[in-house]
Image (cartoon, helix red, strand yellow):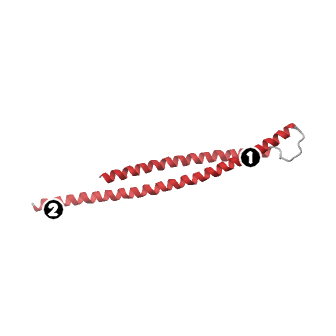
Amino acid sequence: MAKYKIFDLMYRHGKTKKLKTQFELSSMNENIEKIRKLETDLTFNIEETVEPGVVQTSHRVLINSKLREKMISQKEIVGNKIEFLITEKIHLQKLVSSHERKNRKILEKLNELNAEERREKELKEFDRDILFQKK
């Protein structure tokens, strides 16, 4: 019975870890979507500004050029952030599948222990019945 409780606790703990990792994964997916939207917005805003290298004739055009350069550098940073988050997402997906495999093995062991316990119980009842029949 003690083995059963230990494996049951291990299974519950593994299940909790899996749920926590799945929550982190869903949070990561939300972050990736938000950052992709930011990247799209930056792309749109960059296209709306003046291209660098064009002869600047007014103060507003000069400001737009500087703004565009800053947005391009921000877009590069956002692209790097997306790459990092995707790498983390892959890592979390591997963790979830690892937790699933461990939980499956623990559940199989629990089922084996339950079957073994039932067999022992049946054997005890059978032995008891034989003993009563002899008397």
Q: How crowded is mark 1: few (under 14 residues within 10 Å), some or many (20 or more)?
A: few
Disc 1/disc 2 C-alpha distance (Å)? 85 Å
Residue annotated with mark 2: 130
Can you give x and y, in whole percent of width and height, for residue 135 in the image?
9, 60
Left or right: 80 with respect to 111? right
Residue shown at 33%/53% (left/top)? 4
Please state which of residues 59 and 42 is positioned toward the viewer in this rendering: 59
Residue 55: image quadrant is: top right
Residue shown at 58%/47% (left/top)? 28
Can you give x and y, in whole percent of width and height, for residue 22 in the image?
51, 49
Residue 105: image quadrant is: bottom left
Q: What residue type is labelled 1?
A: Ser
Asked if labels 2 and 1 touch by Cβ distance under 8 angstroms, the answer is no
Residue annotated with mark 1: 73
Can you give x and y, in whole percent of width and height, for residue 42 in the image?
73, 45
Can you give x and y, in whole percent of width and height, for residue 73 in the image?
74, 46
Residue at the top extreme, as displayed: 59
Residue at the left extreme, as displayed: 135
Of the numbered discs 1 and 2, the one sitting upstream in the chain is 1
User: Which element type, helix, strand or loop, lies under badge 2?
Assistant: helix
Please state which of residues 80 and 36 is positioned toward the viewer in this rendering: 80
Residue 117, disc: none
Which of discs 1 and 2 lies nearer the camera? The answer is 1
Q: What residue type is labelled 2?
A: Ile
